Amino acid sequence: MAYDDIYAAWKADPEGFWMRAAEAIDWERRPSKALFDENAPIHEWFSDGLVNTCYNAVDRHVEGGRGEQVAIIHDSPVTGTRAQITYAELQQRVARLAGALAARGVTKGDRVIIYMPMVPEALVAMLAATRIGAIHSVVFGGFAANELAVRIDDAAPRAVIAASCGIEPGRVVPYKPLLDEAIELADRKPEFCIILQREQQRAELTPGRDFDWHEVQEGVEPADCVPVEGNHPAYILYTSGTTGQPKGVIRATGGHLVALNWSMKAIYGMDPGDVFWAASDVGWVVGHSYICYGPLIHGNTTVVFEGKPVGTPDAGTFWRVISEHRVKALFTAPTAFRAIKREDPAGELVKKHDLSSLQTLFLAGERSDPDTIHWAQEQLGVPVIDHWWQTETGWAITAIPAGLGEMPPVRIGSPGLPMPGYDVRVLGEDGRELPAGELGAIVIKLPLPPGTLPNLWNAEDRYRKSYLDRFPGYYETGDAGYRDTDGYLYIMARTDDVINVAGHRLSTGAMEEVLASHPDVAECAVIGVADPLKGQLPLGFLCLNAGAGRDPAEVVAEVVKLVREKIGPVAAFKLAVVVDRLPKTRSGKILRGTMAAIADGRDWKMPATIDDPAILGEIAEALKTLGYPKS
Ligand code: COA
Ligand code: AMP
């Protein structure tokens, strides 16, 4: 059967489709059915099954004869080290850490925050939490103390597991002081912290609260897997929304296991034993689904890469990793390829490596521009597959499946066709479905498939408001785009204030909150401007308080520093300009879209509702001082 037949088979019998997929998972108690729609529009999957995530990702492979297979390859050009962990070793490490958590009182349903760089211990920590039914929440290392504090307060973790430091090219990032500050800021203090001391920078431990990673595990009883209900949260992952308060996306255990396991073969074409490499970070959804869980649940070898596509040490690093570890499929963000292409346009470094193991390149996280896709295709000589998904869904909404028989043709500019489970529609403002070729809001007919979010952590109202209320019966993705007559989807823009910087999802609203907190800023707006490397960059407009008498350049420098301190370096907020006024509609809404169009040099129409058109001229002048639009 090929893609068309399989999609049709799902549509004809979704229940049967997912129950069959669920057979590939080892259940303690099999679920009686797949979909639980009693609380529609809140849907759950496999709720009455009993199952453990870690057992399926680790123990069952050891029991099934894969104990000596490498589970995790750690390749770290920033520390000059490489290491391999077999499934049998992973089982021991995870059981011991889980035992240490349990010995300190962590139990089913407790939250554990993980704040770690790209080291195998990050995966060990995630698996140790799910082993005992605890709910982990991984926070990306590039976030500042304040962002970590917001997540600590929302998740109220019993424990935090962190590393003493992360390593960015040219600098060591001490994580522990950030953690200490976050705990100081947070109202809901964790009971204890487990700290992995890295030799690049050891951390001071707070007696009574902080425990050394190794010491805390000494003499503890390794913990067994605790079976949990199919709808028990495996993890919470915070993602950017329209405000400074991130959304806690819940991932329920049963659907997560079933969907990720299915996707490894169907979408990525992987067989157990193959080496899969997602060059992302454990702090993002790609890291959760395809550095940690997907490959391990499916019995693959996963690569944990601690480095960058360029500069660690050069633009040939990706090719070295592929050839050295015989990587079969690589998954990364287009930004990584743009960075490599910029440094090695002729692909001289590509030619130096044996890339014969590589069968497919997958791109996601942001729009793939045709130039990058063509370059990657020419250099690697393998299919380059753009696919589209989001933190909320946990796995691809649209893709070109590499493992469902003959591959449907790739169409450059499109992230492919809907995957089974996703009934994707394009709706107009009035909620009516639009014909092919017309741009509208991209929505998914409910229910969403297994593995997608059932809710937001402690925020059902927000879940309904953000995703379900605008188009009843559908999940609103927040992306706008269109379909062609053959059903290929095209993603054109976000419909909210989320921007995408180097494949990282960021909220302009959150940045505006930080700018507005500066004592001399009366009003502000942040927009995303096009950037040839990172896709988008944030750019801020500041109106200063009358009589502040401040040098604009100084205030700009202060707000840049403030965003770095409050949100983190990952916000990449470096562009800001002081203006007298912001363009608004007569009802007072800031015209961010028009400002972004001017900054990008795109065609734009004077908004009919604009209050004072002259302000747009002032904005254009201010943008010129920053070099926008780029010619
Ligand atoms: N801990 C601490 N700081 C971090 C960090 C982490 N885990 N990750 C990033 N940062 C910092 C960087 O050091 C940088 O700081 P700087 O302003 O002092 O230079 C800042 O955050 C921005 O980081 P980044 O967006 O990674 O930009 P970069 O200029 O360092 O690198 C690329 C550019 C293109 C090489 C890089 O963005 C990249 O590899 N992108 C791939 C994207 C990706 O994997 N996305 C995940 C979704 S699939
Ligand atoms: P995140 O939740 O961080 O994975 O970000 C999800 C958002 O990134 C999506 O809603 C899109 O706006 C964007 N995105 C992800 N993948 C793609 C893609 N292949 N093409 C275009 N945009 C994408």
Image (cartoon, helix red, strand yellow):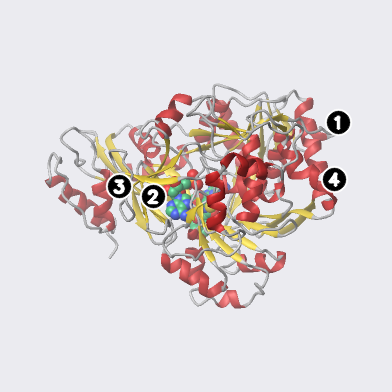
Residue behind mark 3: 553
Residue behind mark 1: 221
Which mark sits nearer the N-terminus, 2 or 4? 4
Answer with the quarter of the image where residue 351 lies.
Answer: bottom right
Q: Could you tell me how far apart the alpha carbons at marks 1 and 4 are, in whole angstroms?
A: 20 Å
Residue behind mark 2: 574
Q: Is residue 224 left or right of residue 347?
A: right
CB under 8 Å between discs 1 and 4: no
- Residue, x 72% and y 42% (percent of image)? 25
As drawn, the label of residue 63 is: 4
Q: Amino acid at mark 3?
A: Ala
Which mark sits nearer the N-terminus, 4 or 3? 4
Identity of the residue furthest to the front in this view: 12
Q: Amino acid at mark 2?
A: Lys
As drawn, the label of residue 200 is: none
CB under 8 Å between discs 2 and 3: no
